[in-house]
Amino acid sequence: MDVASILKGNWEFRVEHKGIKIFSSKVSGSDIYGFKGELELQVSLKRLISLFHDIANFNRWVHHLSEMEVLEANDNTEYVMRQVIDTPWPLQQREVIMRSWLVSEGENAISLTMKEEPDYLPVNPKYHRVQHATGMWVFTPNGHGVVHVTFVMHLDPGKDVPAPVSNAGLFEVPFYSLNNLRALLKDTSYNPPWPKELEQHLSIIEDDPETP
């Protein structure tokens, strides 16, 4: 998965609500659709990236997130993270282990790529370990303090969730996650610390919003 294929991929527009656009796409070898959510935010790029390094507050915006922990961290640009996602009874909660890495893309854009690592830890029978998950966030400043956010994900929850059921709920994750993310960034009492170590790896030309 790369930025070019995401931005120019074969995406079908499905719905727009509260300024959030949702698209879907068939994924080769899977009956589960991939999704793409898009949103424009009045925010500085540094504040947005700081939010993604504020692991302790992921539960405030990631949809249905029950647990989150960092298993490995390298230079603040690469992480292995374990997430537990709530599911409707009687399904087991989904446990997702993913490696993510942050890189510069073109002119001041930043991407965060995510890829499953299901064998990183021994299986815990309490959870259903997700075997196939990949995704990406792309942050593209448009000037005047506006950042275009793209969130792409394909996750197969497992054989105990029929594909039609999984696809029917496809739009909840990008919509609620992006909507919650926007609300948190607008909260003036929320001030995630900027990880200064990133300046050794990323070149960010800050573009402050015209409004707070």
Image (cartoon, rainbow, N blue to C red):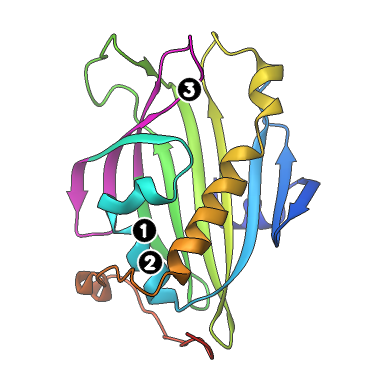
Look at the magenta stretch and give its main secondary structure. Answer: strand
Dot 2: element: helix
**How far across and how far down the image is residue 37, in percent?**
64, 51
Mark 2: which amino acid? Answer: Ile
Q: Which residue is mark 1?
A: 52
| For residue 34, side relative to residue 206 (left or right) | right
Mark 1: which amino acid? Answer: Phe
Q: Which residue is mark 3?
A: 87
Q: How many marks?
A: 3
**Of label 3 and label 1, which has the lower sequence position?**
1
Count residues near mark 1 (Cα–Cα under 10 Å), then give few for <14, some for 14-19, many for 20+. Answer: some
Q: Which residue is mark 2?
A: 49
The residue segment tinted magenta is 70-99
Dot 3: element: loop
Mark 3: which amino acid? Answer: Thr
Are the residues tagged 2 and 1 within 8 Å (C-beta)? yes
| For residue 107, side relative to residue 100 (left or right) | right
